[in-house]
Amino acid sequence: MRIGIPEALLFRRYEPFIRKFFDNLEVDVVYSGPTNGEIMERGIAHCVDEACLPMKIFQGHVVKLQAECDKVVVPRLMKCEFGDSICPKFVGLPELVGKGRAGSKIIFTEPLYLNDRNKLRKAVIKQSKQIGVSKAKVNDAFRAVEEFVRARKQGECYGAGAVSSCEGGGENTGGITGIHDGAIKVALLGHPYNISDSYANMNLVSKLKRLGICPVTGDELTREDMDEQMTGLMKAPYWRFYRENFGKAMALLKKGSVDGILYVSSFCCGTDSVTIEMIRSRIGDFSMLVLKLDEHTAEAGMDTRLEAFAELLERRRQKSKGTVPFDFLKGEKA
Ligand code: SF4
């Protein structure tokens, strides 16, 4: 039996763990590969019109795998590893994708609580039966993943996956490494799948580097670093990515390590509409550009906006030399 795994949504973030688990299950696994034009077109054709771009892309990966595999993994993620809630579209992912005529092949639809070891293990055992894998085998694979998780340092999961900042020259950067020390730096924020999918975001990281801008993803920040930024909020953020992006924005600004914020969002994303406004309410007139992605986003328009943003940041940097820094927590001059 061939099992298909879509390389979309949170796949990049959890990729090492997913691969470790399925390697240890010793089943025949096919990964869908990075998003491309054909996958995107298939997703748009099969998904409901109202869905956001990341969901349409996920659908495209599923449709591709459906033709090649006996079963396709479509997880129903209920809670993330710290117990945070996630967008309801993740909770209803099997139903959303099922409407795309892949329903009969979908597996791993049991609710997954990444913050509850026993619930998670039981759900995975139940699902694995459908592909003929014994409980003992699942337990072995589960233990292998747990050992792997322990070996990694805490907080590492905050990365978008496959996106390097200026120091590296990773796959998505187009190999551009000529960023000098004094380069303009922007906090590159947004949902991990919008940042790590270079087809969906039209090679954003490479574009930034060509403009001489260093993207700072804040991947080194830990959960504690994020939580410190929630002080003063009326209520702790409910959504995982609200907490993460708001926390990263505030932490990076307080450190003074960025000249601006670039927030990559999906058209009609409800959680982002709150997150973006919360960040704006805290940063005063600090420079922030929001790029909205959907299937109609024109590359030329994006290039123009990025060039204008780069110019603005450069002008502001020149102007602010020697001026009093902002107190970002109050949004006023310190
Ligand atoms: S959080 Fe926003 S972008 Fe992500 S799946 Fe939900 S609506 Fe789409």
Image (spheres, helix red, strand yellow):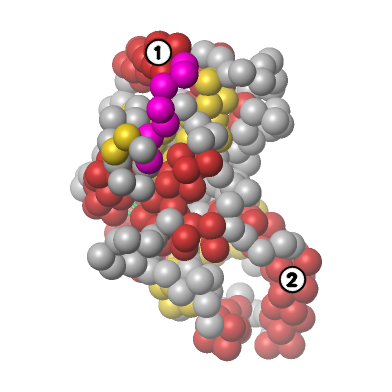
Q: Which residue is mark 1?
A: 319
Q: Which mark is residue 148?
A: none
Q: Is residue 56 visible?
A: no
The one of 140 and 133 positioned closer to us in this rendering: 140
Q: Residue at the location (68% across, 88% down)?
A: 135
User: Which segment did they paint magenta?
Assistant: 321-327
- The spot of residue 40 in percent (x, y) is 41, 37
Q: Relative to 332, is 313 above or below?
A: above
Quadrant in the picture for residue 149: bottom right
Question: 183 and 3: which one is in front?
Answer: 183
The amino acid at mark 2 is: Arg
Where 324 sits versus 314, above or below? below
Which mark is drawn over residue 150?
A: 2
Label 2, secondary structure: give it. Answer: helix
Q: Report the predominant secondary structure element of the magenta stretch.
A: loop
| Front residue of 157 and 320 | 320
Q: Is residue 2 left or right of residue 47?
A: right
**Which corner quadrant holds the N terminus?**
bottom right
